[in-house]
Image (cartoon, helix red, strand yellow):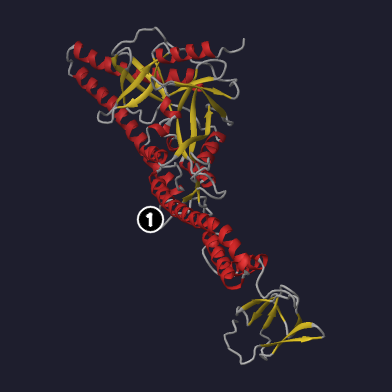
Amino acid sequence: AIDVAVYPLHAELTVENGHPIIRDRSGKRALFVNGLRQMEALLQDGDLLEFGEQGPQLRFRLSSDQASDRKSWRTIVEDSQDIVVRTPHTRYLSPLYLARHILRDIVLHASPAVKAAAAIVLIAPLLLISWLGVVVYREHQAAAMSERRLAELSSQLQTGRLTQTELEQRIEREREGAEALRRQQEGEIAALMAKLKVMEAARQSTQDTRAIQQQLSAIRQSQSFAEDIIRRFGGSVALLQGGYGFKEKTTGRPLRYQGLDQLGNPYVDKDGNALVTLEGIAPRVLIYFAGTAFLVDRAGTVVTNRHIVRMWESYEPAKEVIAAGFEPDMVLLRLFFPGEETPYLLTEVTVSDQVDVATLRMDRVPAAATPLVLASGVPTHVGEPVVMLSYPGTVDTLLARTAQSISQAILAKAGGDPVRLVNEVAQKKLIRPLATQGHLSDVSPDLITYEAASASGSSGAPIFNRAGTVIGVNHATLQRVEGVHMALPIRFVADLLNATQQHNPQPQ
């Protein structure tokens, strides 16, 4: 406990046989010498005396009879440091406190020579220290403002981290959507079959019944076309997963979470925003994304969209973080082929500045996958049937195509971690592309427009014609027109591959 009593006689200092001795006279053992409780102690030069626990402190000094009663420069500095160290204050103000106490001791206890020298030596550093104090304070204020700004920006970033409950809800919505689409297709076939039977029973014209039979045949051929494409080429269409963070431009320090809870979720503020910082060693803030890529040669080159590997260029919250003094930093870029448990790591080869196309190279060549054939120079026509192989919706769509018990087991093991989730799905060999059927509605030298039931989230996917060659790369979906999608003609990919080959020829 803190001794707050005031004693009439706290301690007695005497000189015996030429040695200074101090004795406790409080009756409460309230004398401390160099931090140790003492009843009596032989004092040495520089000993620290404390009267009462956390009470007044004195520094004991010894000097000869001939010595001046003025303090030396060294003693002034040491005593001032003692006072600053033992005085509670804001850390960045220490230089100002030290300068103040040194100046006070010089005025009160220094010799005239020291005072004169100090007037010359200390004025310039004192001004410098004062200026530095102001600078540090401003930097402290700027850092605090930066932390608040980072928190605001991070609240807008959708990093891809979801709780298990959120993932379960998304998977269930995907299941419901797939089931609704299946029922719609079955309903269309059933309606046509029923109409055909009615017409045949009523003995209506052969022309009417033939029209319905042609519609049924077209549906069945379309289904057969999609099944054939996925059987022949599905193994060459891969799931691409990436993740990027941000680094401070001036220092290179990465943006990090302040910490994670036991479930691996970031600490949040009272508004639910993730707490971020530029200090420490906690996990980095990463924004995860996914798309589709496809193999085009035996050297391990794959094609995807530019916007897949430059996600921050079109994502407004990321653009705001960059404008605040950060730069994007790609941390994760990998591929999973159907049936393979181990991912392929990717490096960029060429990212086009003119069109939404990019080529990447794998760290090794897949043994099972066969390069797709590009239909460069092959004419395309409006009305031509097409099939797209892609990974729309990514993990939630993949899990929605499995039994509920399997998806729940994977979620229980991986939680909401995007990297672990994809690893678990690959381990179960559940990665396989989805076939989307449609037909070309418009063809131009720079853009292919096609209509399909659903293709949202299929960036980078190959578009196949009936011959099984790739005529385009899926590019975008018209938001205001349901079922209408756009692809880039495959000639852009061929041009990019040719340019890359000329600048970086592969060894034979």
Q: Residue at x 66, y 90 (%)?
A: 26
In the rendered image of this protein, does residue 105 appear above or below residue 464? Answer: below
Where does the image place residue 46, in percent across and percent down from the top left? 71, 72
Where does the image place residue 66, in percent across and percent down from the top left? 74, 76
- Residue 272 is left or right of residue 38, and the answer is left
Question: At label 1, which amino acid type do we have?
Answer: Asp
Residue furthest to the right: 17
- Residue 64 is left or right of residue 71, and the answer is right
Q: Residue at x 39, y 42 (%)?
A: 170
In the rendered image of this protein, does residue 433 appear above or below residue 494? Answer: below
Q: Quadrant of the C terminus?
A: top right
In the rendered image of this protein, does residue 106 appear above or below residue 49? Answer: above
Q: Residue at x 41, y 34 (%)?
A: 312
Where does the image place residue 84, in percent across and percent down from the top left? 58, 67
Q: Quadrant of the N terminus?
A: bottom right
- Residue 199 is left or right of residue 505, and the answer is left
- Residue 72, by quadrant, is bottom right
Q: Residues within 10 Å of mark 1 (few under 14, many from 20)?
A: few
245, 163: nearer the viewer: 245
283, 368: nearer the viewer: 283
Mark 1, residue position: 271
Q: Secondary structure at mark 1?
A: loop
